C-alpha cells in the first residue's frame, strides 16, 4: 500500500529506549511503514539497538533536524558554520547507522525566527557546506532533503522556487526538497503548483494540517495536494506530522509554537491520518486515470 510514515512526536518527545520502543510498536501496529525521528541525540540512546528494533518492526526511518543558531551554516561566522558542518556530518552518520536513506529538515540554516533576511555570504556558506555534505552523504547511501519552511522558522528557504535555486547552486544531484503542506499553506502562491514545479526534485513529503492537528480540521487543500503528488509522479514516503501540547519536546515545541492541545489521543489521530491519506491518495489516482481515459 502507500508508503506512509509517521513523525515520532505524535508518540513521544523523549529519546528514552522505552518511549522509542512504544513509538515503533504503535507505528507498526497501525500500519505505518516508516517512523521519522527528529532531533535524535545519539548520546541518549544505543544506535545499534534502535537499528535492530526498526528492522524487527519492519519500519523504515528518516532522520530530521534543525540546526541551532550557534551552529547555523548560513551564518557569516566561520566558527559557527564549522559547528553546523560537524553536526550535519554526524547526522548523516547516524542516519546511515540506523539503516535510513534520508536526512531531512532544516539542514541549511538554523531552525527559528531570524531578525533579518539572509546575506549573500550566508547563502554561499550554506551552499558550500551542503555541497560537501552531499559528497559524504552519497558515500553513506543517504540523500539530503531540504525542508522548505515558513518565514518564522528560517529565513533561507521559504518557497519551493528558493529551494530549487539553492539545489542548482550546489550542483549536486543527491540533494532534494522536503516539502510540507503546513509550510506551503503559509508561503506558496499555489501549493499544488509548487509540488508540480518541484517535480523529480521532491525527495520527502510532510502531511500536516494548517493548525498541526487532525487532518481535515484546518485550511490545507488536501485534494489539490494529492492531485499534484500524483501528477508529479511522486512515489516515495509521505509522513504524517502533527503536534499537540499533549506531547512536549522542550526545544521543538517552543520553536514550532505548539501552545494548544489539538488532540489528547495520539492513537486516534494517527489512525485517522492513515485512512485520511490513503483515501485521498486513492481518490487522486482514480481522478488521474479517469482524466486520461478516452
Ligand atoms: Mn515538517
Image (tube, rainbow, N blue to C red):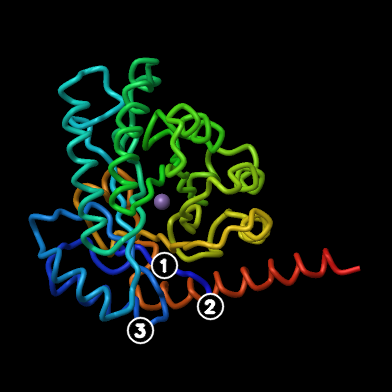
Could you tell me how far apart the alpha carbons at marks 2 and 3 are, in whole angstroms?
15 Å
Marks 2 and 1 in Cβ contact (< 8 Å): no
Q: Nearer the viewer, mark 2 or mark 3?
A: 2
Label 2 packing within 10 angstroms: few (<14), some (14-19), many (20+): few
Label 1 packing within 10 angstroms: few (<14), some (14-19), many (20+): many
Q: How many marks?
A: 3
Q: Secondary structure at mark 1?
A: strand
Q: Residue furthest bottom?
A: 29
Q: Secondary structure at mark 2?
A: loop
Q: Residue at x 26, y 81 (%)?
A: 56
Could you tell me how far apart the alpha carbons at marks 2 and 1 are, in whole angstroms?
12 Å
User: Mark 2 or 3 closer to N-term?
Assistant: 2
Q: Residue furthest front?
A: 139
The image quarter containing residue 58 is bottom left
Q: Which residue is mark 2?
A: 1
- The answer to whether residue 279 is left or right of residue 72 is right
Check the image and report above or below for 42 versus 189.
below
Return the residue nearer the eye: 130 or 27.
130
The image quarter containing residue 114 is top left
Numbered badge on residue 262: none
Numbered badge on residue 5: 1
Q: Residue at x 25, y 49 (%)?
A: 92
Instruction: Point out residue 79 in the picture as x, y percentages from the top left corner.
Output: 15, 23
Q: Which residue is mark 3?
A: 29
Q: Residue at x 35, y 63 (%)?
A: 7
Q: Nearer the viewer, mark 2 or mark 1?
A: 2
Amino acid at each position: 500500500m502507500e508508503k506512509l510514515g509517521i513523525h515520532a512526536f505524535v508518540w513521544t518527545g523523549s529519546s528514552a529506549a522505552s518511549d522509542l520502543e512504544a513509538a515503533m510498536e504503535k507505528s507498526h501496529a497501525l500500519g505505518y511503514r516508516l517512523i521519522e525521528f527528529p532531533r535524535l541525540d545519539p548520546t541518549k540512546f544505543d544506535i545499534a539497538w534502535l537499528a535492530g528494533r526498526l528492522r524487527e518492526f519492519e519500519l523504515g526511518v528518516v532522520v530530521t533536524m534543525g540546526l541551532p543558531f550557534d551552529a547555523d551554516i548560513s551564518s557569516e561566522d566561520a566558527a559557527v558554520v564549522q559547528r553546523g558542518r560537524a553536526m550535519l556530518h554526524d547526522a548523516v552518520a547516524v542516519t546511515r547507522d540506523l539503516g535510513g536513506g534520508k536526512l531531512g529538515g532544516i539542514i541549511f540554516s538554523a531552525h527559528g525566527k531570524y531578525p533579518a533576511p539572509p546575506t549573500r555570504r550566508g547563502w554561499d556558506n550554506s551552499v558550500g557546506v551542503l555541497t560537501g555534505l552531499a559528497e559524504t552523504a552519497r558515500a553513506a547511501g543517504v540523500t539530503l532533503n531540504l525542508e522548505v519552511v515558513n518565514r518564522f522558522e528560517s529565513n533561507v528557504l521559504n518557497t519551493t522556487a528558493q529551494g530549487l535555486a539553492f539545489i542548482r547552486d550546489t550542483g549536486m544531484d543527491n540533494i532534494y526538497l522536503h516539502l510540507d503542506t503546513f509550510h506551503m499553506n503559509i508561503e506558496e502562491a499555489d501549493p499544488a503548483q509548487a509540488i508540480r514545479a518541484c517535480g523529480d526534485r521532491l525527495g520527502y513529503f510532510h502531511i500536516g494540517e494548517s493548525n498541526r492537528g487532525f487532518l481535515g480540521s484546518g485550511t490545507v487543500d488536501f485534494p489539490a495536494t494529492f492531485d499534484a503528488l500524483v501528477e508529479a509522479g511522486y512515489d516515495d514516503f509521505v509522513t504524517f506530522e502533527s503536534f499537540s501540547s499533549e506531547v512536549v519536546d522542550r526545544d521543538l515545541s517552543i520553536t514550532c509554537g505548539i501552545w494548544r492541545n489539538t488532540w489528547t489521543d495520539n492513537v486516534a489521530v494517527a489512525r485517522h491520518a492513515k485512512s485520511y491519506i490513503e483515501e485521498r491518495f486513492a481518490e487522486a489516482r482514480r481522478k488521474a486515470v479517469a482524466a486520461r481515459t478516452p
